[in-house]
Image (cartoon, rainbow, N blue to C red):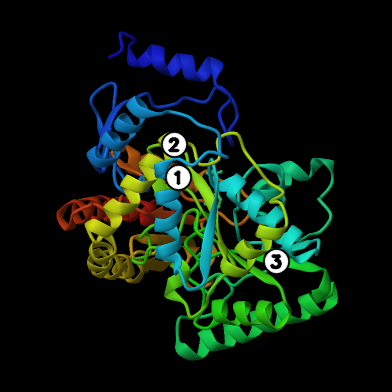
Amino acid sequence: MSDLSGEEVARLHEEYVLQPWAKQGAPATPVKRAEGIYFWDYDGKRYADMSSQMVCSNLGHQNQVVVDAIKKQADELCYIAPSFAVEPRGKLARLLVEIAGAEHFQRVFFTLGGSDSNENAIEIARFYTGRPKILSCYRSYHGSTLGSAFASGDWRRFAYETGGAAPSFVHFLNPSVYEDGFDRTPEDEERCTRQYLHQLEQQIAYEGPETIAAVLMESIVGANGVLIPPKGYMEGVAELCHKNGILLICDEVMAGFARSGKMFTWQNFDLVPDLVTFAKGVTGAMVPLGGVIASKEISKFFESHPLPCGLTYSGHPLACAAGVAATQYYLDNDICAHVKQLEDVLKPRLEEFAERHACVGEARCIGLFAALTLVKDKQTRELLAPYHTANGRMPAIFAELKKRGFYTFGRESNLNVCPPLIITEDELNEQLDILDEVLTWADHEFCE
Ligand code: PMP
């Protein structure tokens, strides 16, 4: 396919590509090919993709059903403007509405990825409610376009605030049970939920509910460490929204498409959002696609008001063809059931790591959506890399893993374990053995 060497491919990238979220010119591993849960570099070294890249390659690499659907659509019709009717676009919209629940949802606005799905959900919520403010969590990531970045709460939003924070974007603190000093006992979870809901209720009152268009939340916070909320918290947020005429936008960009063992992660909770944003897993990342699923009420509203958003590539036929094939693949192969089965392997093993390893503070796992919080001191819960520090410890751990062919990522002191959802039990156990070995190394390196 290519006559360039690995060194030449790496050099092209390092010299010409503006690399996201990084200092430029840093070394980049040249990747030759990928298949299933693995990818290979130019030296033939194999890596298990234990983060599904950016938690998006849910169906593994090069899923043949999706590849074939893309090829077939490319032969037939690559592009037609969003105002035309084209089979894969309508079919995918209907499929997503059915999965979200046709009793509550009606229409889908298509985008190109996660950032612009949140960007457009914000616009839709503001236009529909006539209210300006968007409330979102500090412990969150919603994207890197201006609006979605202002809504994000983690360190990355600071990059955008050099020109001043945007008006009408308000943050509230969402729970991180372990870091906030709570345990996973029913009593502690209840106390944690009560404390955080009380704070949010007060914040809504002080901001003025009549000024708030929407609360935007990841159904389970992903990039910031798979923060499984305490029992009752998400339902409580939905209730506060409902009581105050505030829309609830669930960001399913990372959590969606079977990652938690349900097609959408909010379906693990007793609530129904007004808008659902999605991307990544909808095509298994084989083509960029995202979107917003709108409730019946919101969909109806835009029958008498023109929708104030639009993109040239909204509902791109190639992407939608991939979306139909991938979404149907999750359903036909009952990927949710497979994920639930493997949760019974992954969760106990990670919890056992948390008991045995000095450097593991807590393990969190729902479906194949998991993270470890790494600590310097288990007694005091001192994090291995406290917020806003770059002490090199986490990069050293990721490098040790990569050396052994285990690829993943994490932010702050969290190490994410989010393999492709088609991983087998044997493959999973093999990789967890490697993780175990590296955690032993980290115990000695950082905790003695
Ligand atoms: N929302 C969430 C929850 C995400 O995890 C991400 C990306 N990691 C985004 C939005 C942004 O998506 P994209 O990078 O496709 O724009």
Q: Is residue 368 left or right of residue 292?
A: left
Q: Is residue 56 visible to us here?
A: no
Q: Amino acid at mark 1?
A: Arg
| Mark 2 or mark 3: whose residue is earlier in sequence | 3
| Mark 1 C-beta to ligand 1 under 8 Å | no
| Mark 2 C-beta to ligand 1 under 8 Å | no
Q: Nearer the viewer, residue 301 or 197?
A: 301
CA–CA distance between discs 2 and 1?
Answer: 6 Å
Tell me where residue 340 sits by quadrant: bottom left
CA–CA distance between discs 2 and 3?
Answer: 31 Å
Residue assigned mark 3: 214
| Mark 2 or mark 1: whose residue is earlier in sequence | 1
Label 2 close to label 1 by CB (< 8 Å): yes
| Mark 3 C-beta to ligand 1 under 8 Å | no
Q: Which mark is residue 89?
A: 1
CA–CA distance between discs 3 and 1?
Answer: 27 Å
Spot occupied by residue 76 in the image (x, y as percentages of width and height): 35, 28
Between label 2 and label 3, give the one nearer the viewer.
Answer: 2
Spot occupied by residue 181 in the image (x, y as percentages of width and height): 56, 77
Q: Which mark is residue 128?
A: none
Q: Residue furthest left?
A: 426
- Can you say whether 241 is above or below 169 in the image? below
Residue drawn where x is 81% and y is 61% of the image: 132
Q: Which mark is residue 317?
A: 2
Q: Amino acid at mark 3?
A: Ala
Tell me where residue 343 sits by quadrant: bottom left
Q: Nearer the viewer, residue 383 or 366?
A: 366
